[in-house]
Amino acid sequence: MADAQPLTLRELDSIGVDRLRGVGERKLAALEAFGISSVLDLLTFYPRRWVDRTNEARVSDLEPGKEALVLVSVRSVSKRITRNRKTMVTAVVGDGSGRLTVTFFNQPWREKQLHEGLNISLFGKPDVFRGGLQMTNPIVDLIGDRTGRIVPIYPQSEKVALNTWEIAGFVENALERCTARGIADPVPWPVQQRLGLLDRTDALRLIHLPDTMSDQSRARRRLAFDELFRVQTVLVARKRALERDSLGIRHEVDGELVARLREALPYELTGAQTRVIAEIEADLAKPHPMHRLLQGDVGAGKTLVAVSAMLTAVQGGHQAALMAPTEVLAEQHATGIRRLLDGVTVPDPGNLFGDRPLRIELLTNRITGSDRRDVLAGLADGTVDIAIGTHALIQEGVSFHSLGVVVVDEQHRFGVEQRAALRDKAGGAVPDVLVMTATPIPRTAAMTVYGDLDVSVLDELPPGRTPISTHWANGPLDEAAVWADVRAEVGEGRQAYVVCPLIGESEKLELASAEETYERLSAGELHGLRLALLHGRMPSAEKEAIMDRFRAGALDVLVATTIIEVGVDVPNATVMVILDADRLGIAQLHQLRGRVGRGVHASRCWLVTTPDPDAEGANPRIEALVK
């Protein structure tokens, strides 16, 4: 008889967990409560974390105020109702080194979950109460009584009494039953060897039942590879299907309009811009739609590349659209692109004078009444050449006569659905899509996240752009130097931003708020300078008025929330101060830093943090940006 083929994931999905040893009606119901009905569900129900018994704390080692993980057994459990009608469950737990009191508020089900002799893990921050150690509302995991150096901790529920070793036992039984045939692996053995990957069977065993933490890490790496591989396969298949089945526009890329743009530029294109424009034009000349990601640092000249692509559509009799995530950014683009294309006309053989004006329109939710009707009519009849807007471009009632090129700015604010919605309004053939982002994305990550897009990178700044120096101010003495630098720059006629993570004060988070910071700086460190406050809760008209004053130089310092992360272009601003910088992600910090360094003057970014006594001075995100 021929050897049986390895088990496929589809076969594993067809085998019910009720066929496993020890799974009766009660256990089956408990597993199904977790969404586990098949062997595949069970094998892919991964532990949420793993406990290395050699590194766990003992009760006698616990210190007040320091989070710790302990493995203990329950000695006693009691419940009472407090004076304010709250339920309080108290458990006394311990190990060989001592005892600990654990208190749960408003979790009455803990009385039934915990019972004498039960082995559990607790993760929390102990404190001192009536002379003894106590944990309040810690994270609890049911461990069971099985031993092993590495303990897998599975997701658990207050309603399901299924301890971690019971789940591990079912997994072990499932893997034993798979041993004879093995589990099919889509990654060929030579590729596994080249990439240093476990095979799928070993990965599934070691993610649940590792002998060492190194085993667990290797298993996670292989299973993460599988997930990314599946995502990439779907995205590439989608891209190939779009190329195969979608009718695109074969653009004429050597037209007069794009040539006029380049002749009108007061500067030469960088080598990177020339290369990327050539990559885009090669896509535009093909019969199937372009789907390309344009990645470039702030100030690298992405907008000019996008305008070149849009004019390629216009010179062929089509339209172009640029969609931005915020009204501020859309308005900024409209102003900048109109300025860039001022005086550029469209060759028109049917026109008495040989040329016609280039019509650029802005469409956001602030455009209303007759102005909105005029823009919508122009989009529908083709007299609008370039539309710049927000999500308003994909709302009901918006249609294009012949949309040839779509540019989406700041992709991390849009999903595939929004891109598709704009594409669906094209009015015929599928338009070419160019996605722009200033967020630094490693090429391998870009292939994963944007697998349906080809990638172009602008890795060169235009002449005259000065690099931004980044400094870390960690503590009051450093912060004093920050405000001195702001005053010095304003004294030279420059401007500055101060960014705060919150609008108003927070009782839960000790973070600088924009309102409190504005009041403090106005009366203190920056007293006498012209300050203004900007945040997202302000009416749009008020926000725009403040931005207009800042652009015009009527303000020295703009105190704002992260609303200015994108869309603000003031070349005279040379200092960016980011308060509580350690509370923001590295991509957001990079975007904020890019608000300065947009002119010819040297610019600085200050990352201000409060010293953390437990961090020993290290902060990898801040240090990476400073480098």
Image: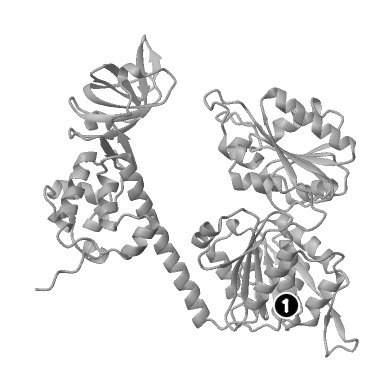
Element assignment for label 1: helix
Q: Is residue 194 left or right of residue 38?
A: right
For this rendering, which residue is in front, 99 or 616?
616
Residue sitting at x 71%, y 49%: 594
Q: Which amino acid lies under the numbered mark 1 shown in the image of this protein? A: Thr
Neighbour tally class for label 1: few under 14, some 14-19, many 20 plus, Cα within 10 Å:
many
Seen in the picture, residue 430 relative to 479 is either above or below; the reply is: below
Q: Is residue 123 left or right of residue 508?
A: left
Task: Residue 104: give x, y in percent of width and height.
Answer: 34, 26
Seen in the picture, residue 47 relative to 341 is either above or below; the reply is: above
Q: Where the C terminus falls, by quadrant?
A: top right
Q: Is residue 506 left or right of residue 577?
A: left
Q: Which residue is mark 1?
A: 312
Q: Where the N terminus falls, by quadrant?
A: bottom left
Q: Is residue 465 left or right of residue 535?
A: right
- In the displayed orientation, state which residue is furthest to the top: 131
Task: Residue 129: give x, y in percent of width and height.
Answer: 38, 13
Quadrant of the image occupied by residue 83: top left
- In the displayed orientation, state which residue is furthest to the left: 1
Colour mode of the rendering? one colour
Tell me if I can see residue 368 in this picture. no
Quadrant of the image occupied by residue 476: top right
Seen in the picture, residue 109 relative to 9 is either above or below; the reply is: above
Task: Residue 387: give x, y in percent of width and height.
Answer: 72, 70
Residue sitting at x 75%, y 82%: 254
For this rendering, which residue is in front, 226 or 25?
226
Tell me if I can see residue 228 in this picture. yes
Task: Residue 269: give x, y in percent of width and height.
Answer: 78, 66
**Count of numbered circles in the view:** 1
